[in-house]
Image: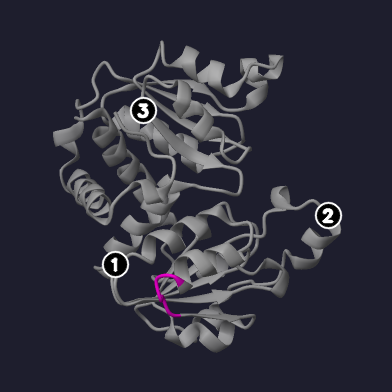
């Protein structure tokens, strides 16, 4: 049995296999319609979510399985003070596989100590969101035809953005990758990621506060929202929340082949006027999240 807590839990070969399975699901969904018949997925969401929770549920349903769970902590026994470990041990009595989101970083590591079923980390605080990273990788692969030799711009909240952190770790393992890190000074990427990933692996990168100046060199622009829920100071959030807004005028500086990704939800950091541009891939990205989660469920269940 295996869990997925951190994108680093997967080798490049395992990621490539999941992408290949997702591609096959997209091409021939009927082959997979009964793969999880009589299997149950529990979605334990101690923190609000739309795309992640619904895509897990849709993934299991399209595999012929069933879903049970809760969508907020207040509707679970956590509201009575039950520990994560006890919740997991109980739910493992009812489900074959569990997807869990929790606001506390490290909660999934507690969960796997007591789990008798595979656990998928669906996001833990500002730490990890590995299935979003798999979604991002599948999207880049399908949009660009490769995961190598790309210049990837990451824009917005690079300090608290768990999707940025996980994607940077994952993409740094592919050859020919360069990162352009675009953020206000206060929201720069954490030093430990620079030291432990970029510098240690000799991955080229640059940091800037100016999106327009680097737009022409990008193959991927990964936009993120400034997350109100990660700030301790409301004044800081208000001051920084509109730092970068992607408009058609700014996008006109980009290559025709460039693609815009966003883990969603967006607030106003991408103008709705960008949505109809063929380079806007974020809703295709949301759909890809269902397919890669289907592939992951099959892999963890050994089906």
Q: Position of residue 235 (x, y in %)?
A: 85, 59
Measured Cα–Cα span from mark 2 to mark 1: 38 Å
Q: Earlier in the sequence, mark 3 or mark 1?
A: 3
10 Å crowding of disc 3: few (<14), some (14-19), many (20+): many
Residue at the location (20% across, 27% down)? 35
> Residue 147: which disc?
1
Mark number for residue 118? 3
Q: Pointer 2: what residue?
A: 234
Distance from Cα at disc 3 to Cα at disc 2: 38 Å
Up-down relation of residue 53 to residue 270 (above or below)? above
Is 202 included in the stretch rendered in magenta? yes
Choose between 259 and 180: the one closer to the eye. Answer: 180
Label 2 element class: helix
For the question of whether residue 81 can be seen, the reply is yes
User: What's the mark number on residue 131?
Assistant: none
Report helix, strand or loop for mark 1. loop
In the displayed structure, 40 sits above or below 3; it is above
Answer with the quarter of the image where residue 102 lies: top right
| Mark 3 vs 2: CB contact within 8 A | no
Above or below for 146 versus 21: below
- In the rendered image, is residue 270 in sight? no
Where residue 219 sits, quadrant-wise, is bottom left
């Amino acid at each position: 049995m295996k869990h997925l807590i951190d994108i680093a839990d997967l080798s490049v070969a395992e990621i490539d296999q999941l992408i290949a399975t997702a591609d096959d699901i997209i091409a021939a969904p009927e082959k997979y319609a009964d793969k999880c018949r009589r299997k149950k997925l529990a979605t334990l969401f101690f923190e609000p979510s739309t795309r992640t929770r619904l895509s897990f549920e849709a993934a299991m349903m399209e595999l012929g399985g069933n879903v049970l769970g809760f969508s907020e902590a207040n509707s679970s026994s956590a509201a009575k003070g039950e520990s994560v470990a006890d919740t997991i041990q109980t739910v493992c009595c009812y489900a074959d596989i569990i997807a869990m989101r929790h606001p506390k970083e490290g909660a999934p590591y507690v969960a796997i100590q007591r789990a008798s079923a595979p656990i998928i980390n669906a996001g833990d605080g500002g730490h990890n969101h590995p299935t979003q990273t798999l979604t991002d990788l599948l999207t880049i692969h399908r949009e660009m035809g490769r995961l190598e030799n790309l210049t990837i711009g990451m824009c917005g909240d690079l300090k608290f953005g768990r999707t940025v952190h996980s994607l940077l770790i994952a993409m740094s393992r592919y050859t020919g990758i360069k990162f352009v890190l675009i953020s206000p000074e206060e929201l720069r990427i954490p030093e430990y990621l620079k030291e432990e990933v970029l510098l240690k692996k000799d991955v080229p990168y640059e940091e800037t506060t100016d999106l327009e100046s680097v737009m022409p060199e990008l193959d991927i622009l990964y936009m993120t929202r400034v997350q109100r829920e990660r700030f301790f100071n409301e004044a800081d959030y208000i001051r920084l929340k509109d730092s970068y807004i992607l408009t058609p005028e700014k996008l006109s500086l980009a290559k025709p082949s460039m693609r815009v990704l966003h883990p969603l939800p967006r607030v106003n950091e991408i103008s709705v006027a960008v949505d109809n541009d063929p380079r806007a891939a974020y809703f295709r990205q949301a759909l890809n999240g269902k397919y890669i989660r289907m592939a992951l469920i099959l892999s963890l269940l050994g089906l």
